[in-house]
Image (cartoon, rainbow, N blue to C red):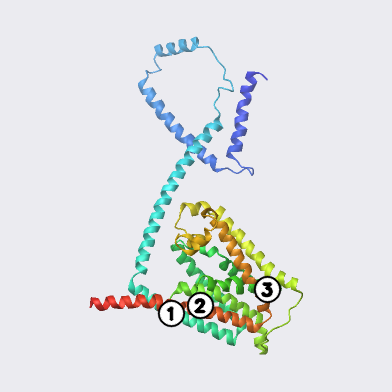
């Protein structure tokens, strides 16, 4: 093919490149089309300004002398045909302009984001100052104390009189408490705690109650999950019954009420028949019980752990790196280098804290599953097990009231007396 034929085919090639650049596979206009149009529009304005300036400085082309000079200069120049190598690529030029515009937009977005973050921090600071006001704190503590005590009484009444309604009570309390916790945690940059396994278990329990109520395999898996790692977290995380603290009571609800719900679902028929067996014979062989109470619940745990790692280590990794104030379970356990949790998770090196944390969680979860087959077949042992955990939470609350709250109260009273 000759040079002239190539030059005539060049626009067709540019047109095909532009079509692929401006239109997607479905034939819809892409965002690059509008960016390119904006770039062309701005360049046309600049070109017209340059032309107006150059025409003002140059002599008028309407005079005969100028026309003759132009004709002589054009006749002296050799006529050259454009070659494809010398023609600038239209698509390449437009892509450069689009990239430049997108870079400016990213810079502008970054500036706007910084302004918004400063505004959010200022509002959060004002809210924190408001919540520290003694009158506000005292009124909130009074309301939380009354609601906490009433909730405990309500749970006890349903457990003794209508155990089959415990799931409905659980759902009624779960929705407002989770909404309130998310709002509070979001303001404190702690909402990533709500990706933990205990919250994932609440979703599984709701699915079991309202979507798969007759699924025995799921019921046994949830029995192990709710009575194992969820109930055990009361001891591990030192949850306490502090009635005036909405945060502490919500944590107790998350970890203590799901085991009670599963207790009622497991032994509700025995309550109705007024039968309280100490131990029932195991159904199936030993291997079947391992699958139902150990392996299946651990698969649910592994699914959650996979989703959690994808969320924190890939999907939101850039966000977590950009904002070190966002708190996760691992960051909470390692934010103080002098703490025992930091030393434990750094046993194999600080660079391996995540792996160590995942491994310790998995070992803890498996250990809590070990006695679940026994609790499933013994109403008395199951009740005693939950009673022990409740007493530990009550003891933690007593320690808080007498060793923390009472000390602060005495100091506050002493300041008021000295001021008078």
Above or below 147: residue 101: above
Disc 3, SS? helix
Q: From the viewer's perspective, is the residue at label 3 or at label 1 nearer?
A: 3
Which image quarter holds the N terminus?
A: top right
The quadrant where residue 21 appears: top right
In the shown orientation, is residue 16 left or right of residue 31? right
Q: From the viewer's perspective, is the residue at label 2 or at label 3 nearer?
A: 2
The quadrant where residue 221 appears: bottom right
The disc label shown at residue 393, or none: 2
Tell me if mark 2 has few (under 14), some (14-19) or many (20+) residues whose alpha carbon lies within 10 angstroms of its own: many
Residue located farthest toward the front when viewing the structure as drawn: 347
Disc 1, SS? helix
Which residue is found at the position 41% from the left and 54% from the top? 116
Of marks 1 and 2, which one's residue comes earlier in the chain? 1
Cα distance in 3D space between marks 3 and 1 = 35 Å
The disc label shown at residue 368, or none: none
Q: How many marks?
A: 3
Q: Which residue is mark 3?
A: 220
Tell me if mark 1 has few (under 14), some (14-19) or many (20+) residues whose alpha carbon lies within 10 angstroms of its own: some
Which residue is found at the position 65% from the left and 66% from the top? 298
Of marks 2 and 3, which one's residue comes earlier in the chain? 3
Q: Which residue is mark 1?
A: 145
Disc 2, SS? helix
* Discs 3, 1 touching: Cβ within 8 Å: no
Of marks 3 and 1, which one's residue comes earlier in the chain? 1
| Residue closest to the eye, 304 or 398 | 398
| Residue closest to the eye, 181 or 232 | 232
Q: Position of residue 217 (x, y in %)?
A: 70, 71
Asked if one can make out residue 53 in the rendered structure from this viewpoint, the answer is: yes
In the shown orientation, is residue 299 left or right of residue 394? right
């Amino acid at each position: 093919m000759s040079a002239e034929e190539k030059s005539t085919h060049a626009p067709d090639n540019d047109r095909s490149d532009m079509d692929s650049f401006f239109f997607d596979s479905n034939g819809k206009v892409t965002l690059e089309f509008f960016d390119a149009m904006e770039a062309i529009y701005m360049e046309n304005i600049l070109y017209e300004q340059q032309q107006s300036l150059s025409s003002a400085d140059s002599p008028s082309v309407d005079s005969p002398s100028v026309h003759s000079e132009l004709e002589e200069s054009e006749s002296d120049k050799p006529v050259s045909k454009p070659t494809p190598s010398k023609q600038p690529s239209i698509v390449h030029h437009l892509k450069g302009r689009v990239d430049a515009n997108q870079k400016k937009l990213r810079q502008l977005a970054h500036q706007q984001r910084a302004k918004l973050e400063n505004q959010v921090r200022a509002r959060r600071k004002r809210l924190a100052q408001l919540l520290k006001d003694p009158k506000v704190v005292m009124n909130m503590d009074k309301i939380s104390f009354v609601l906490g005590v009433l909730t405990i009484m309500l749970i006890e009444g349903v457990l003794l009189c209508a155990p089959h309604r415990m799931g409905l009570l659980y759902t009624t309390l779960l929705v407002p408490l989770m909404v309130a916790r998310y709002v509070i945690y979001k303001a404190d940059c702690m909402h990533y705690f709500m990706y933990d396994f205990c919250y994932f278990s609440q979703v599984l329990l709701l699915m079991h109650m309202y979507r798969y109520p007759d699924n025995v395999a799921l019921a046994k898996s949830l029995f192990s999950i709710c009575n194992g790692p969820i109930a055990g977290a009361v001891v591990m995380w030192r949850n306490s019954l502090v009635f005036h603290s909405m945060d502490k009571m919500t944590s107790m609800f998350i970890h203590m009420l799901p085991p009670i719900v599963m207790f009622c679902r497991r032994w509700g028929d025995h309550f109705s028949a007024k039968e309280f067996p100490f131990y029932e014979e195991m159904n199936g062989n030993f291997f079947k019980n391992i699958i139902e109470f150990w392996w299946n619940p651990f698969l649910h745990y592994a699914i959650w752990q996979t989703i959690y790692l994808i969320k924190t280590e890939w999907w939101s990794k850039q966000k977590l790196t950009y904002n070190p104030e966002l708190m996760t379970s691992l960051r909470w356990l390692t934010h103080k280098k002098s703490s025992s949790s930091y030393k434990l998770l750094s046993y194999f090196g600080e660079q391996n804290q995540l792996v160590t944390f995942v491994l310790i969680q998995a070992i803890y979860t498996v250990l809590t599953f070990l006695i679940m087959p026994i609790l499933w077949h013994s109403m008395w042992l199951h009740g005693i097990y939950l009673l022990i955990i409740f007493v530990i939470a009550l003891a933690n609350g007593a320690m808080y009231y007498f060793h923390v709250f009472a000390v602060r109260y005495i100091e506050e009273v002493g300041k008021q007396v000295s001021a008078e």
